[in-house]
Image: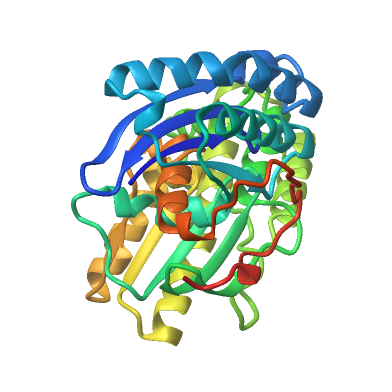
Amino acid sequence: MRVLGIETSCDDTGIALYDSEQGLLAHALYSQIKTHQKYGGVVPELAARDHVRKVIPLVDAVMEEAGVAPNSVDGIAYTSGPGLAGALLAGSAIAKGLAFAWDVPTVGVHHMEGHMLAPMLEEDAPDFPFIALLVSGGHTLLARVQAVGEYEILGQTLDDAVGEAFDKTAKLLGLGYPGGPAISKTAEMGDPKRFKFPRPMMDRPGLDFSFSGLKTFALTTVQKNTLDQKTVSDIAWAFQDAAVDTLVKKCKRAIEQTNIPRLVVAGGVGANIALRERLKAMMEKSGGKVFYPKIELCTDNGAMIAYAGCQRLHQSTRDLGFSVKARWSIEELPAL
């Protein structure tokens, strides 16, 4: 089966073509970073407009790269939630329009299921069950994955997502948007001994997260110090160290509590080098293994939506009506 995937949940327009026998045939991504950079974050209306402009040209490019004609596509998968409502509606409407023109069924995909299954696109794919850490600008959660469609949330953020905390702290430090790569690069020159940031939610049992306090601690640290280049680097190092340490320790708890030796990490923050190094060391020490999608598939992309949609194509419909869910728990998804 060949499935076209359309991802428009936030500020990345992702298109991909996945074949159940040949694997990923082609994918393309348009990032809106330059559009939103001057605002210091994503502007929902601008994001939706960009998706409307970019989806069809990217579909054409992907189909041409793969050498596939519309009559060879068996279905279209699109992100139907969670995410920005306007952005989701843009992608959903275009998906339905293409489905009508090509006479193929469509299936709405849960954005986080796409992230969870993204490592399945790799040659070294994890076996079920596994623990999934999903970390991005909009989501931070730990889940037990028994099989496709069988998800149990073990813990999630009670306030800010970790990627959001990176963005806001970067803004405090004058590092621009997006904050994750900016803080990671700046932290390389930081002094590990100058500042010590708290590890939120680590003084109590459980697997939930909280990053608003870490962001506030960064704010008070900025207010108490003169922001020269050295201080900015030192604060960036301390913030990243605290965020990464918290994520790693929560993952260690989840592995120990479930006795599952496989950890999948996905989402934009999963590309953070410090996080990858610490998680790899932790899993090797415990006798387990950590799995990631390719760096370009850590952030939002069409490939993960095409793959997840291929697994759920039996749940597809030819109904041209559609709705989106800005908020949608992954535990609500039906099993295959």
* In the rendered image, the vertical position of residue 332 relative to residue 177, given as above or below: below
Within the image, what quadrant is residue 154 found in?
A: bottom right
Q: Position of residue 123 (x, y in %)?
A: 19, 50
Residue 25 vs 67, above or below: the answer is below
User: Residue 302 versus residue 234: which sits nearer the camera?
Assistant: 302
Q: Residue at x 28, y 24 (%)?
A: 66
Q: Would residue 194 be visible to someone looking at this image? A: no
The residue under the point 21% across, 42% down is 22
Residue found 46% across the figure and 54% down from its top = 313
Residue 163 in the image: x percent, y percent? 61, 44
Position of residue 206 measured from the top left corner of the image (x, y, whole percent): 61, 80
Number of labels in the image equals: 0
The colour scheme used to paint the residues is rainbow
- Depth check, front residue: 225 or 237: 237
Q: Position of residue 156 (x, y in %)?
A: 64, 66
- Residue 258 appears in the picture as rendered: yes
Query: Eyeballing the image, is 134 above or below 74?
Result: below
**28 w.r.t. 336: above or below:** above
In terms of depth relative to the viewer, which is nearer, 294 or 198?
Answer: 294
- In-front residue for pair 224/303: 303
**Residue lying at 35% horizontally and 56% vertically, measured from the top left:** 278
Q: Quadrant for residue 63, please give it.
A: top left
